[in-house]
Image: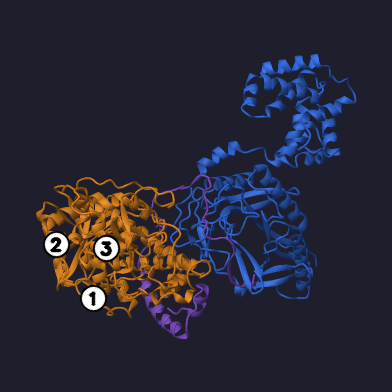
Chain colours: A orange, B blue, C purple
């Protein structure tokens, strides 16, 4: 079969059942394609030639037993974990294996993929552009058909933003839905693992596989997601937050998003304007909590039990450790960390109030399409601002989906669908319905 | 001028749970081969997460309840951040702003010493220095600890000694720790300052005595420190906040860290562990608490009319107190039994209470040792306790002692206990 | 906003070059100026949110499980004697 690698996960499962091809053939096709395209894209840091299961690409911040796991950092250049993350074990029982470990921003800190110690990943749609981050390799690998699907991690948009910039589907589940055990912690209270994938239905399936209680993660005593047929509900109420369409949003991106909303309206959705009034404080609150937890989470890397010495951290990692250490230091804790945690409450309440009026909230994922490699790298604050629409979901712990919804200058744009906590079902339904009436995902980058 | 010491104590006690505080590694690390009781969690591997040990939390609450503490409606773990090679995560999971148990007290030398808190945390690994290298063993990393902090209410080193002994006895009564100071199960830190007598309020400095791993040295260090501080003040010097250690060779304390060098632990709530709210379990625990050593002491004096000294000796351990009460139940005279056990320093591991009863009575009354009478009594005892027979056959050998007790009571303590035991065993095995 | 980069780097156990110190001093103060925005948010009477899981009392029973077996013997680091 020629376009074996362009099949969705559900199509692959069907084909395997019908014996249209074998797992061996499937893996061979992917390995061939990886060998051909990875030198251009730098999506994979390590490839597993012996994968004999459904090949998934795993972000390199997820622990894989006996497979090198570097978090794209020099400090873990030779680190081979003695244990599997819970999600890896769960995928294994579903017949899914690790075909490779994907590049990302070092310790998942970044929005462009450029902070990897092993070189930036390129956007499959335009090799001069960033693929977004931090799950840059996972998104690029899915967009370029270098895996059936990928796992990414989302701390402030790290699944949704690269999915948006690469034109694929990305799902950030509710905090606590998927076990974090084995995910190298960035911001423990924001981090979530989720799929980057070729269709919304696939996303629902993978979420079912990786969700549910895990006794190894105290915050994951949650409910398993059960995948049901994603039927469109008429009169679904869709909220559009005015704060997500203001200054900073590229007018061309805005147009694409508004067209997508119109499409949903045509499907019978009731469109309502809603307000998330504390959005303007989200970024500041996000980065205080993010960097504070980072400064503590990355303290274990001291080179004694594993890894190398602390001077091997890259620039962005050091910057965030410094910022977080300062924010937690004596005399500043209340001013920064506690204040940010209070703002977090306000943002959570904003969503709760908005969701009284609507079932999902839609808006852009990223204020712009993919930018040039190198463009923002020397201006951390501008880089942070590219996360402006994604961080709130992490502050509130709610699920959010990114689905392809068009192009600006031949670069993909993603539509973000945010849902109530534990209600992935509704955002997936909306995403699925939109996917059925549009053809965006059939557009593939020419490589 | 006369000065008065102002001392507060911090006691760390290692709990004797089976597993560690946040992972399933065995907590029984003493004397084990280095780094054989470790896993991703207690080694701080990337991606590992802590899940609290329920038993450890219960033990912490039992300690808190025994010390009259309130159990917090909401308690949080926090991260105490600092770098040291024995601390694999670069932070210790501890409690700071939201401790599990707060506001208790303990009576020492007739005075109330206020307990500020009893909180839960984890131990660090162990370092050994060899030449220019430091060898690290993480078997102890993550073993549960409870830290008990008093207000600065001690006025002398005798009170501190008394306090440490009382706590040790309490931990053993509760069965939450072996509390062996030699093995480091119980570690003490003291905050010492002095103030002119009759002056109210706390001095504006305090000296922390830390990293002193023997109880004897701690007492010596406190005594030394009180003298040192008084003479400094008398010489017109100002004392400042600092941390000092103990030099056993020179028998003096020495400066470890000045106020300027003080740690900045950057505490913040541990995001990996949801909040703890265990007031309702505390009510259940309260009902299951064993009689506390000081309550037993008071009861022994009241119920048995023992002197305070006698009662203190007999309640030193729960086992000895039980032994004494068993002999009394078996018909021994209250005072005679107390004297006998105390004076002869009876080893309760080797002697049965019934034997003590015989020995006491043997001198004054005729012992029943003829086989037939004893068999009759033994049969009666077994007939009255059919469940005992069943239990014995299931392997519960302790019922033998209960049956001997029954026979002793029936014979008003005159039966020959060792023969009774033989006969009973024969019946129990053949029934 | 001016921060003592040397002091923070020491707390963070990060060895920084002179160059890095200067760069971070500038960048961090710019970022912290932006963070000042937080002060405009009215948080009077608002409880902080530290954990969004909504869970409490997640504990495990006191049971043991086999430890890792790949490493025996001590971990070694350069001497620390300052405590």
B208 left or right of A212 in image: right
Chain ID at mark 2: A
Depth order, front residue of B249/B304: B249
Depth order, front residue of A175/A332: A175
A190 left or right of B63 in image: left
Q: Which residue is mark 2?
A: A442
Chain ID at mark 1: A
Percent position of residue B407, x then y? 75, 20
Q: Which residue is mark 1?
A: A129
- Residue displayed at 72% across by 16% down: B379
Q: Is any part of residue A420 visible from this angle? A: no
Percent position of residue B168, x then y? 70, 49
Q: Which residue is mark 3?
A: A160
Total labels drawn: 3
Identify the image quadrant of the C terminus of chain B. Answer: top right
- Residue displayed at 72% across by 27% down: B401
Depth order, front residue of B116/B327: B327
Residue B240 is drawn in which quadrant? Answer: bottom right
Q: CA distance from mark 3 to mark 2?
A: 19 Å
* Mark 3, secondary structure of its residue: helix
Chain ID at mark 3: A
């Amino acid at each position: 079969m020629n376009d074996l690698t362009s099949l969705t996960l559900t199509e692959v499962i069907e084909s395997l059942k019908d014996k249209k091809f074998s797992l061996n053939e499937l893996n061979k096709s992917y390995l061939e394609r990886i060998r051909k395209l990875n030198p251009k894209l730098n999506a994979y840091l390590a490839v597993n030639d012996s994968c004999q299961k459904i090949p998934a690409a795993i972000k390199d911040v997820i622990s894989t037993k006996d497979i090198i796991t570097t978090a794209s950092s020099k400090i873990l250049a030779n680190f081979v974990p003695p244990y599997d993350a819970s999600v890896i074990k769960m995928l294994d029982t579903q017949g899914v294996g690790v075909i490779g470990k994907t590049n990302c921003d070092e310790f998942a800190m970044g929005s462009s993929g450029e902070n990897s110690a092993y070189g930036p990943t390129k956007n499959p749609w335009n090799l001069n552009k960033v693929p977004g981050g931090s799950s840059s390799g996972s998104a690029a690998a899915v967009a370029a058909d270098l895996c059936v699907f990928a796992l990414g991690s989302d701390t402030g948009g790290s699944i949704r933003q690269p999915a948006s910039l690469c034109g694929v589907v990305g799902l950030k589940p509710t905090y606590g839905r998927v076990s974090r055990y084995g995910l190298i912690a960035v911001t423990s209270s924001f981090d979530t693992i989720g799929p980057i994938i070729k269709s919304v239905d696939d996303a629902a399936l993978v979420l079912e596989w990786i969700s549910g209680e895990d006794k190894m993660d105290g915050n994951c005593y949650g409910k398993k997601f059960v995948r049901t047929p994603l039927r469109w509900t008429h009169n679904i109420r869709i909220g559009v937050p005015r704060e997500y369409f203001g200054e900073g949003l590229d007018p061309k991106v805005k147009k694409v998003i508004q067209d997508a909303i119109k499409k949903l309206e045509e499907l019978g959705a009731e469109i309502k304007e809603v307000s998330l009034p504390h959005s303007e404080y989200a970024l500041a609150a996000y980065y205080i909590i993010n960097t504070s937890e980072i400064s503590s989470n990355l303290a274990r890397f001291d080179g004694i039990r594993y890894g190398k010495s602390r001077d091997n951290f890259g620039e962005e990692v050091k910057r965030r450790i410094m910022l977080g250490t300062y924010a937690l230091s004596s005399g500043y804790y209340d001013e920064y960390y506690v204040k940010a945690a209070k703002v977090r409450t306000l943002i959570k309440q904003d969503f709760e109030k908005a969701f009284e009026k609507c079932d999902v909230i839609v808006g852009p994922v990223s204020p712009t399409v993919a930018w040039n490699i190198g463009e923002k790298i020397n201006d951390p604050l501008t880089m942070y601002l590219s996360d402006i629409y994604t961080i709130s979901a992490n502050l509130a712990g709610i699920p959010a989906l990114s689905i392809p919804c068009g192009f600006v200058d031949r670069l993909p744009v993603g539509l973000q669908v945010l849902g109530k906590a534990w209600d992935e079902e509704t955002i997936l339904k909306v995403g699925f319905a939109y996917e059925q009436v549009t053809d965006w995902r059939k557009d593939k980058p020419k490589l | 001028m006369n000065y008065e010491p102002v001392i507060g104590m911090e006691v760390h006690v290692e709990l004797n749970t089976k597993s560690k505080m946040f992972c399933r590694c065995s907590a029984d690390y003493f004397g084990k081969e280095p780094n054989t009781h470790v896993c991703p969690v207690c080694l701080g591997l990337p991606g590992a997460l802590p899940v609290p040990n329920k038993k450890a939390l219960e033990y912490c609450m039992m300690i808190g309840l025994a010390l009259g503490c309130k159990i917090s409606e909401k308690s949080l773990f926090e991260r105490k951040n600092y770098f040291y090679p024995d601390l694999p995560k670069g932070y210790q999971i501890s409690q700071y702003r939201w401790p599990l148990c707060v506001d208790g007290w303990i009576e020492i030398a007739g005075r109330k010493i206020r307990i500020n808190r009893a909180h839960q945390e984890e131990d660090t690994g162990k370092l050994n220095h060899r030449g220019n290298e430091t060898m690290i063993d993480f078997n102890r990393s993550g073993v549960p600890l409870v830290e008990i902090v008093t207000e600065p209410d001690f006025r002398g080193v005798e009170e501190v000694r008394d306090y440490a002994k009382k706590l040790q006895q309490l931990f053993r009564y509760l069965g939450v720790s072996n509390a062996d100071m030699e093995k480091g199960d119980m570690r003490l830190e003291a905050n010492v300052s002095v103030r002119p007598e009759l002056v109210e309020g706390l001095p504006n400095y305090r000296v922390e005595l830390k990293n002193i791993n023997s109880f004897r040295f701690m007492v010596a260090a406190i005594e030394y420190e009180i003298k040192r501080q008084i003479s400094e003040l008398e010489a017109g010097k100002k004392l400042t906040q600092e941390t000092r250690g103990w030099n056993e060779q020179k028998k003096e304390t020495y400066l470890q860290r000045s106020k300027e060098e003080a740690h900045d632990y950057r505490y913040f709530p541990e995001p990996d562990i949801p909040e703890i709210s265990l007031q309702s379990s505390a009510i259940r625990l309260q009902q299951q608490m064993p009689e506390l050593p000081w309550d037993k002491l008071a009861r022994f004096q009241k119920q048995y009319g023992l002197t305070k000294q006698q009662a203190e000796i007999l309640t030193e351990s729960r086992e000895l107190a039980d032994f004494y009460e068993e002999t009394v139940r078996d018909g021994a005279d209250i005072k005679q039994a107390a004297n006998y056990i105390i004076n002869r320093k009876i080893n309760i591991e080797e002697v049965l209470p019934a034997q003590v009863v015989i020995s006491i009575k043997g001198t004054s009354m005729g012992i029943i040792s003829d086989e037939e009478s004893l068999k009759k009594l033994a049969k009666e005892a077994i007939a009255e306790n059919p469940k005992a027979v069943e239990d014995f056959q299931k392997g519960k050998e302790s019922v033998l002692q209960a049956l001997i007790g029954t026979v002793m009571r029936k014979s008003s303590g005159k039966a020959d206990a060792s023969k009774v035991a033989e006969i009973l065993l024969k019946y129990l095995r053949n029934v | 906003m001016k921060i003592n980069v040397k002091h923070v780097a020491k707390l963070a156990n990060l060895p920084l070059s002179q160059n890095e110190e200067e760069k971070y001093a500038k960048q961090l103060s710019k970022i912290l100026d932006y963070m000042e925005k937080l002060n405009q948010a009215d948080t009077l009477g608002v409880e902080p949110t530290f954990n969004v899981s909504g869970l409490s009392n997640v504990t495990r029973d006191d049971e043991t499980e086999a430890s890792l077996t790949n490493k025996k013997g001590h971990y070694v680091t350069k001497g620390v004697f300052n405590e």
